[in-house]
Structures are given as structure tokens and as C-alpha cells.
Image (cartoon, grey):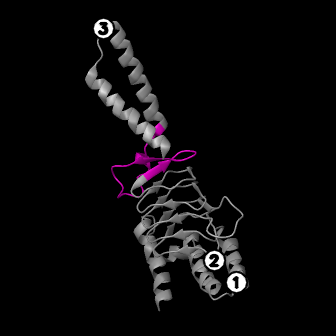
Amino acid sequence: MEFIKIIVDDFKNVKNNDPALESRFELFFNYPGLWALFFYRISHVLYKKRLRVIARILSGLGQFLTNVDIHPGAQIGRRVFIDHAMGVVIGETAIIGDDVVIYQQVTLGGVSLAKGKRHPTVESGVTIGAGSKVLGNITIGKDAKIGANSVVIKDVPSESTAVGIPAHVTKRIDNKEPLKHNVMPDIDKDLFNYLLERIELLENALLSGELDKEREEKLKEQHEMFIATMKE
């Protein structure tokens, strides 16, 4: 019964995550991510029972029908939503918690051919933007966000955002709205603005012979923040 409830939760979860859904009828034709999870849930049970050839065949069928490649050995929690889904790849040793949102073209991949844990662990409440690549045995902390097209190769702390190639971590103010991709921090833009302000500050100091201490202190705080970000 628990297995059936997990699948029912998958179907109900679409309505919670996609305002475009207008009828349950659409679930059968417009949500490949949902059906990819359906095939995964069954193949995962078979995989755990060591019926691995059958599990892989069923997984391959699901991949053919949905264009989503989820290895039956992966561990995926409840109410995971794969939106649009096309081109999503989830590796064998990946672990995904509850209430995770994954967009199209996301890869949870490995960077090693060695046996053992080689794919990411994604904790509950994480949002992974379209086109992102999360690679290796790393951990994406609870309620974190990965910006679209980012390449993540290091751990991401809980309640933070990673953006860029390779991704750098920044703290965010609002982490409760998983669809607010427009408020993702732009590190390059912020750094460029910082440099312009620093140049202006020094030019004014040369002309006036006096340094604006208050503005200098604010820029110093920004500089320390950038250095900390680059080390993440």
C-alpha cells in the first residue's frame, strides 16, 4: 500500500507544482516527467529485489517513451517533480530527497568510473534549474537552489544558491519561492559594479585628497563577500 501511495502522491504533486495543469486528463499526455517517475518506481522495486535485468529493460522502455533516463538503482524520495523533463539524466547512485523540483536537461551525473557512490545527493526541497549539471559525489543541501545552466562540482550548503560555470555559492534572502529564477544572484554583474564603484572612489580620493571612509567600508564588506564566494 505504501508503494501505491507514493505513486498517487506523484500524480497529485503535479497540480501543486504546475499552474498550467487544467485537467487530470492532461497528466496522461503532457507530463513525461511524471511517467518517467512511474516507470522508475516500478523498476526500482525490481532492482532492489535483484531482478536487475528486468529492471533495466523496464527502465529502458521508460527512457524510450519519455526521453528521461533514470537508473533504477537511484534513490528518489516523495513528491519529486520533473517539469518538462526532456533530456533529464539521473545516475545509478544518485540520492534525491522529498519535494525536489527538477527542470529539463538536468544531469545528476558522475565524474568517475569507480564503483561506489559517484553521483550527487540532493536533499529535500531543492530546486535544480533547466540545463544544470550536478556532477560527482557531492551534496546539495536542503532547500538550496541551482541556477539554470550551472555546472556544480562542489557541495552546496542548505538554503543557498549556486550559479555559474563552475557554480559558485551565494546566500539568498528569499528561498521559499522555487520558481523565482529571475531573482537569482548575478555574481559577474555584482563584481563589475563593485569594480566601477572602487575606481570612482579612488578617483574622487585623488581629486579631493580625502577618502570617503563610509563608502570604503561598504566596498570592503563587498570585497570580503566576493572572496568568500570564490572559495565556496
> Which residue position is annotated with label 3?
208
Number of numbered discs: 3
Furthest residue in direction bottom, as rendered: 1
Q: Residue at x 34, y 13 (%)?
A: 204
Q: Is residue 133 magenta?
A: no
Furthest residue in direction left, as rendered: 214
Query: Residue 146: where, in percent of width, then height?
Result: 49, 54
Q: Is residue 121 visible?
A: yes
> Which residue position is annotated with label 2?
72
Q: Tell me the magenta residue range.
A: 161-187
Question: Is tag 3's residue or tag 2's residue first in the polypeptide sequence?
Answer: 2
Question: Is tag 3's residue or tag 1's residue first in the polypeptide sequence?
Answer: 1
Q: Is residue 134 left or right of residue 171?
A: right
Query: Residue 2: where, in percent of width, then height?
Result: 46, 88
Looking at the image, residue 203 lies above or below residue 196: above
| Circles 3, 1 touching at the beta carbon (< 8 Å) | no
Q: Dot 3, crowdedness within 10 Å: few (<14), some or many (≥20)?
A: few
Image disc number at residue 52: 1
Looking at the image, residue 222 lies above or below residue 79: above
| Circles 1, 2 touching at the beta carbon (< 8 Å) | yes
Question: Is tag 1's residue or tag 2's residue first in the polypeptide sequence?
Answer: 1
- Front residue of 74/118: it is 118
- Dot 3 amino acid type: Ser
Q: Is residue 30 visible?
A: no
